[in-house]
Amino acid sequence: MIKIGLLGCGNVGHVIATHAENIRVVAVFDIIPGRAEELAALCHARPYTDFDAFMREDFSIVVEAASVGAVRSYAETVLRSGRDIIVLSAGALADEEYRERLIEAAREAGKTIRIPSGAVVGLDNIKIGQVSPPKTLLLRTTKPPASLGMTADTPTEIFKGLAHDCIKQFPKNINVAVALGLAAGRDADVELWVDPAAERNVHEIFVEGDFGDIYVRVRNVPSPDNPATSYMAALSILTLLKNLENPLVVGT
Ligand SMILES: NC(=O)C1=CN([C@@H]2O[C@H](COP(=O)(O)OP(=O)(O)OC[C@H]3O[C@@H](n4cnc5c(N)ncnc54)[C@H](O)[C@@H]3O)[C@@H](O)[C@H]2O)C=CC1
Ligand SMILES: O=C([O-])CC(=O)C(=O)O
């Protein structure tokens, strides 16, 4: 049984703590005390709002489902303490200097940073970009305006540019774009749209390269507790945890 420390007791944290089969959540951490206490009671873990105290618990892996800021604050300490980390708020790794520092910390500690596929599919073979760089790498994301805390009467493009800039403006909505770029080996182009007619979080991925071309469209059901986050993101972490010690590895 893998013992985990859960960083973030919100929407995804709830799904992980209440649905994981092969893991035991021993400790949960959140800046909001009520959230940590409520989730700890649900999964028979110990609640923490003090990070140092959380880190004194006995777990081998931290699952981050909190925020880009939380990754920046805590991920290096997690790795240097000899634990692996799963990072859902992948946008934290958009900054090259920080990313290299984190990777170096993992290397020195002999530990691993895992980025789950989250709210998209296809990150497996988009990694071919690391050996054959793509000519085109574009993510077009369309969400209901309310999930970005805004209103719009018509479909509106609210960002066009590179993922590492987009994540600075929308840290709760476009982590997928940074994960896509990390897989493909280059910063992704991003178009972020809000559409009042959209009922789902739609991610369209366009790739062109020497291999040919790819078009992927994911039409995600928003999480009931946080419509900005697709339910698939929580399922993605559960699946990663389920396969963590599996000797059969499928996909690139
Ligand atoms: N890579 C991907 O494909 C996806 C990434 N995400 C990201 O995953 C993360 C979790 O998503 P949700 O559970 O829906 O968010 P949420 O907002 O429902 O829950 C986040 C929880 O983390 C806590 N938190 C935030 N910053 C913290 C900090 N510095 N220290 C301690 N606790 C902190 C909050 O108080 C909250 O309880 C978000 O950053 C979201 O943007 C979400 C969907 C897809
Ligand atoms: O859940 C989604 O559809 C994508 C998302 O919020 C993110 O990448 O931060």
Image (tube, helix red, strand yellow):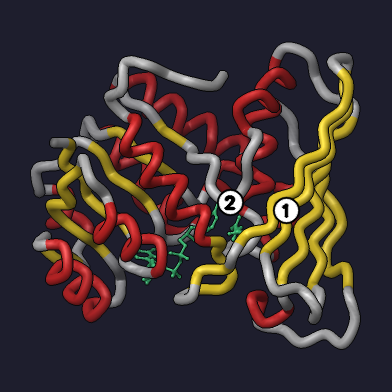
Q: Which residue is mark 2?
A: 119
Mark with earlier residue (2, 1): 2
Is the shortest distance between ligand 2 and the CB of mark 2 under 8 Å? yes
- In whole angstroms, how far apart are the C-alphas of marks 2 and 1? 8 Å
Query: Is residue 63 positioned above or below 13 on the image?
Result: above
Residue 20, above or below 210: below
The picture quadrant where one finds residue 194 is: bottom right
- Residue 33 percent across, percent down from the top left: 22, 77
> Pointers 2 and 1 in contact (CB under 8 A)?
yes
SS at badge 1: strand
Q: Quadrant of residue 173?
A: bottom right
Tell me the amino acid under the disc marked 2. Ala
Q: What x and y, as percent, mark residue 37?
A: 17, 74
Q: Which residue is mark 1?
A: 203
- Foreground residue among 92 and 181: 181
Q: Which residue lies at the image location 30% right of the left edge and 33% below the top edge?
A: 84
Quadrant in which the N terminus is drawn: top left
Residue found at x 22% / y 58%: 51
* Secondary element type, mark 2: loop
Task: Give the x, y percent position of residue 233.
Answer: 50, 53
The front one of 207 and 177 is 207
**Left or right position of 235 against 83:** right
